[in-house]
C-alpha cells in the first residue's frame, strides 16, 4: 500500500520556468492538500480539494494553480517559477470531515524544489 | 489572525525522562487538535488527536491534553528514547473549516 506518492522528489528550475508536481493517493480519500514548508514558517496551505473536480485556495495560493481531474490525483502547477517558491512541498490526503470529523492527514514524502 | 504557536527552541532531554511539548493557539477556537511527528527529509506522520470536549488522550507512551481555558495543548512522551528524537508538529481545525492550521514544530532531541 503506497499511501501518498509525490513526483518528482527533487527539481531545480530557473526563474520563469514552469513545472507540475504530481500527487497520487491510493486510499480512496476525498480530500487532498498541498502545503509548503519553509524554515521557521511551518507548514502553510497552498490549495486543497474536497473532492474530484473541486479546488479551493489556502493561505498562500499566489503563483500556484491546481487541478483534481481524478479523485486519486492532485496536481500543483507553477506557471512562472520565482526564487521565493524555493521550498519543500508536501501533498496530503484525508477522508475528510465527515464521520468522526477528525480529518487526519496522510502525507507524502515531499518534493524539494529549488528556483535559481 | 489565527495562530498556532510552538516553542521554536529545541528541547533536549535525557533518555528515560518525560518530554513535554507545548502548543498554544490565539484568535482561534479549535474543535480538534492533532499532533504529528516529522523526521528529517520525510513527511509528517499522525500521532494523536484530541477533541475540545476531551481533557486527555493516551496512546502507549504518548499523552496529549487540551485546555480550552488556557488555549493550550500539551504533548507528553514518557520514558523517552533516542528514537523519539524528531520534530513534533501541532495542528488545529475548527468546526467550520476543512483546513488544518499547523504550528512551526518543536525539535526534540533525546540523548542517552
Image (cartoon, coloured by chain):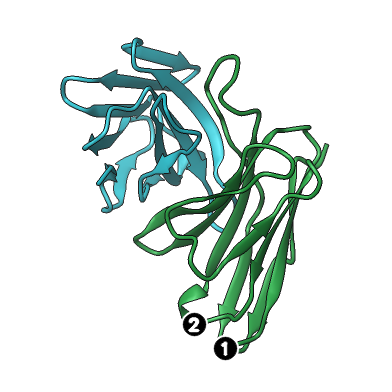
Neighbourhood count class around disc 2 (C-alpha, 10 Å): few under 14, some 14–19, many 20 upward: some
Residue at image location 29% in from the left, 36% down from the top = B23
Residue at x-position 65% and y-position 28%: A95
Q: Please tell me the colour of chain B.
A: cyan
Res B112 seen here? no
Tag of residue A15: 1
Circle 2 SS class:
helix
* Mark 2 lies on residue: A83
Residue A83 as seen in the image, left or right of residue B51: right
Whether A113 is drawn above or below B111: the answer is below
The quadrant holding residue A25 is: top right
CB of mark 1 within 8 Å of CB of mark 2?
Answer: yes
Q: Quadrant of the C terminus of chain A?
A: bottom right
Q: Position of residue B72 (x, y in %)?
A: 24, 28
Between residues A29 and B56, which one lies in front from this camera angle? Answer: A29
Residue at image point 28% right, 53% down: B8
Rendered hue of chain A is green
Q: Is residue B96 above or below residue A47?
A: above
Residue B63 percent coordinates (x, y): 39, 20
The relative height of residue B46 versus residue B59 in the rendered view (above or below) is below
Name the quadrant of the N terminus of chain A.
top right
Q: Secondary structure at mark 1?
A: loop
Q: Position of residue A75 (x, y in %)?
A: 71, 58
1 or 2: tag closer to the N-terminus: 1
Query: Which residue reaches farthest left?
Result: B70
Amino acid at each position: 500500500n503506497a499511501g501518498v506518492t509525490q513526483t518528482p522528489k527533487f527539481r531545480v528550475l530557473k526563474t520563469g520556468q514552469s513545472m507540475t508536481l504530481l500527487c497520487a493517493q491510493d486510499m480512496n480519500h476525498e480530500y487532498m492538500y498541498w502545503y509548503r514548508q519553509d524554515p521557521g514558517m511551518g507548514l502553510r496551505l497552498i490549495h486543497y480539494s474536497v473532492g474530484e473536480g473541486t479546488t479551493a485556495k489556502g493561505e498562500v495560493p499566489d503563483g500556484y494553480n491546481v487541478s483534481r481531474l481524478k479523485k486519486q490525483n492532485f496536481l500543483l502547477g507553477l506557471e512562472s517559477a520565482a526564487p521565493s517558491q524555493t521550498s519543500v512541498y508536501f501533498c496530503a490526503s484525508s477522508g475528510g470531515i465527515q464521520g468522526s470529523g477528525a480529518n487526519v492527514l496522510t502525507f507524502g514524502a515531499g518534493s524539494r524544489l529549488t528556483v535559481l | 489572525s489565527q495562530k498556532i504557536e510552538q516553542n521554536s527552541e529545541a528541547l533536549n532531554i535525557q533518555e528515560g525522562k518525560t518530554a513535554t511539548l507545548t502548543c498554544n493557539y490565539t484568535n482561534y477556537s479549535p474543535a480538534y487538535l492533532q499532533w504529528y511527528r516529522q523526521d528529517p527529509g520525510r513527511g509528517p506522520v499522525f500521532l494523536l488527536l484530541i477533541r475540545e470536549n476531551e481533557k486527555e488522550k493516551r496512546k502507549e507512551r504518548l499523552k496529549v491534553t487540551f485546555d480550552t481555558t488556557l488555549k493550550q495543548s500539551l504533548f507528553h512522551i514518557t520514558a523517552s528514547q533516542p528514537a523519539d528524537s524528531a520534530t513534533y508538529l501541532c495542528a488545529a481545525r475548527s468546526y467550520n473549516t476543512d483546513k488544518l492550521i499547523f504550528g512551526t514544530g518543536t525539535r526534540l532531541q533525546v540523548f542517552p
